[in-house]
Image (cartoon, rainbow, N blue to C red):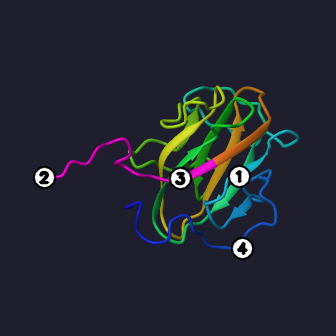
């Protein structure tokens, strides 16, 4: 989807009163927009999910958010300033079905470098261009590597395929 059509970041549903992630997909915290920073903790939650992206290492507790976009969109996601070794992945409609990015890769990250913020905490996650179709529910899972848990911050930004490029005028 073209990332700049419509009202970016708006979703469907009734927002949760809390921004702390839920324990499972069934009780995921509902997001109605992706315009605010998500903060919370994975400490004290269960280990319900794990994806290899590309590192194996289950055992850390995780939390889940759900988002159903109102328009087609592509989104960048980052755990840049989280306090622990994070894993971040996005399921489409159900557990185990990873959403895809605009490049066709699974929406799954462990230890990816943020392309702009060079002061990120070590071992955090970044996914570029998660493709999201209007009316489809996506589950955003914040996890940890191994048994790592802690405070997280998840930032969402509109995917811009021309980021970092200079557009030259033909004249």
Can you give x and y, in whole percent of width and height, for residue 54 in the image? 55, 29
Q: Is residue 167 left or right of residue 10?
A: left
Check disc 4 and report the residue beneath it. Answer: 14
Q: N-terminal of the two: label 3 or label 2? A: 3
Q: Along the line of sight, which residue is nearer the eye, 171 or 24?
A: 171
| Quarter-of-image position of residue 26 | bottom right
Disc 2 vs disc 4: which is toward the camera? Answer: 2
Q: Which residue is labeled 3 in the image?
A: 157
Q: Position of residue 43 (x, y in %)?
A: 85, 39
Rendered image: mark on residue 170: 2
**Which residue does the image show at 61% across and 60% down from the upper left?**
35
Q: Quadrant of residue 55?
A: top right
Q: Which residue is situated farthest in the left direction here?
A: 171
Mark 3: secondary structure: strand
Specify the principal SS of the magenta part: loop
Over which residues does the magenta segment extend? Answer: 155-171
């Amino acid at each position: 989807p073209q990332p700049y059509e419509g009202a970016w970041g708006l979703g469907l549903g009734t927002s949760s009163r809390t921004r702390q992630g839920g324990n499972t997909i069934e009780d995921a915290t509902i997001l109605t927009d992706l315009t605010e920073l998500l903060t919370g903790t994975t400490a004290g939650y269960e280990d319900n999910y794990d994806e290899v992206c590309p590192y194996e290492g289950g055992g850390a507790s995780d939390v889940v958010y759900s988002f159903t976009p109102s328009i087609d969109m592509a989104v960048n996601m980052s755990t840049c300033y989280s306090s622990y070794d994070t894993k971040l992945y996005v399921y489409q409609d159900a557990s185990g079905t990873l959403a895809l990015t605009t490049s066709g890769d699974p929406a799954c990250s462990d230890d990816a470098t943020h392309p702009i913020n060079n002061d990120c905490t070590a071992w955090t996650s970044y996914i570029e261009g998660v493709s999201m179709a209007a009316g489809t529910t996506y589950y955003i899972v914040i996890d940890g590597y191994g048994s790592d848990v802690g405070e997280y911050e998840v930032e969402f930004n509109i995917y811009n395929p021309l980021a970092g490029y200079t557009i030259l005028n033909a004249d």
